[in-house]
Amino acid sequence: MPKVFAMFNLVKLSRIRAALLLSLLLLSSHPALSSARLFSINHDIVSPSKAVLNIPRGGRTRVSSPSASTTTTSTTKKSSTAVTEGLKNTLASGLAAACSKTILAPFDTIKTVQQNVVGDKSLGLIEAGKIISSRPGGIFNMYAGLGVAALGSMPSVGLYFGVYSYCKRMIGPRLQGCFGSDRGDGKEAFCSDGVLKNVSIMCSAAIGNTVASFSRVPYEVVKQSLQTGQYSSTSQAMSSMWKQGGMRSFFPLGGVSIQMVRDIPYAIFTLLSYEFIKENWVLKRSVDDPNNRWLRDMVAGATSGGIGSYLTNPMDVIKTRLQTSSAMYGGSITTCAAAVLEEGGPAAFMRGSVPRLMHKIPANGCFFLFYEFFRRVLRCEEIQTS
């Protein structure tokens, strides 16, 4: 009998030893719990910055993953920075929009009057100026709608550039991580980082303008009604429009859609041009000559604004028609485009292009001058590019 108990104890002890040995083997072979990952030993000193071994109640072992913690912290910081920079750009662009609108309001008024002419007749620059000045109020009619334009442009432009800045900071790195040089799977880049950067600018501009278009339409409708002489003051325009059609008067049929059809391509052409000129000329030249940075900002903004304005003038003609005489075309973009084509042929789509360029080129020059100035005042960060 004692031999039986002794044999039983021996078997039991062997099982315990086998279980302990198996546990040690599993612990050493598990990738997350291996000793090489648990501790970083250098001169017999365990580095706590590499990993932490936590043994809570119950005897269970828990390993804090430093890489996961670092990734989470980095992502949170990146998102926080994008939001902060977006808010800074919102304020900077809103202030810049008010400054540029005030300086260049007369050209915008002349452009609106030229584009609102129905039929095959077209107005020259001086002739349109005379018509505006002949109204009650004289030369001050050149600034018709300035108040609503300046106050209305601040939230819409601010929203646009704020969303644009945020999206550019979030979309760019994600595109590079999925298709560019920062791919995590080790494969060759699908396309160059330069192409992906342009794609991120285009997507960000489209998203920003889509969001801003809904806030931009009401003040554009009121402003153009004042510029065409339908009303004599902002208060009269808003009260009369509200009595005639309520909220619908500020959002005419086709008004939002044509605003987006014009503004999204305009934003893409303008910002692609501006970002290219800024990166390849403004920033590089400003390293050796920082005192004339303001002049280069103005030239870059004026050039990019001219490119965007000229290429989107046909959409601007249709937008003006729909927002001032929506009922005539049933709010349809295609109906309005067909009517414009029938009236004056392809050349009719370029009506108002000269005063629009005369307005947009200096307007964008002034806007980006003030925009970059306010960005420096607010200490906005430049996005680092490879």
Image (cartoon, rainbow, N blue to C red):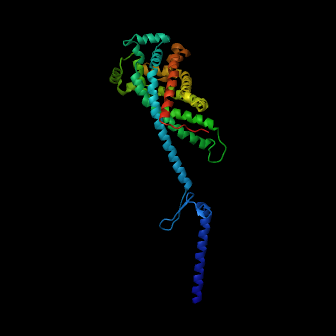
User: For this rendering, which residue is in front, 240 or 294?
Assistant: 294
Q: Position of residue 6 (x, y in %)?
A: 59, 85
Q: Quadrant of the C terminus?
A: top right
Image quarter of residue 63 = bottom right
Residue shown at 43%/22% (left/top)? 102
Q: Position of residue 26 (x, y in %)?
A: 60, 66
Image quarter of residue 244 = top left
Q: Position of residue 361 (x, y in %)?
A: 53, 22
Q: Quadrant of the N terminus?
A: bottom right
As displayed, is residue 168 above or below residue 299? below
Q: Position of residue 218 (x, y in %)?
A: 41, 26
Q: Is residue 101 left or right of residue 289?
A: left
User: For this rendering, which residue is in front, 375 or 305?
Assistant: 375
User: For this rendering, which residue is in front, 77 or 68?
Assistant: 77
- Extreme right residue here? 188
Q: Is residue 38 left or right of residue 153?
A: right
Mark yes or no: residue 252 visible. no
Mark yes or no: residue 193 visible. yes
Residue shown at 60%/84% (left/top)? 7
Number of disc labels: 0
As displayed, is residue 64 above or below residue 129? below
As displayed, is residue 127 above or below residue 385? above
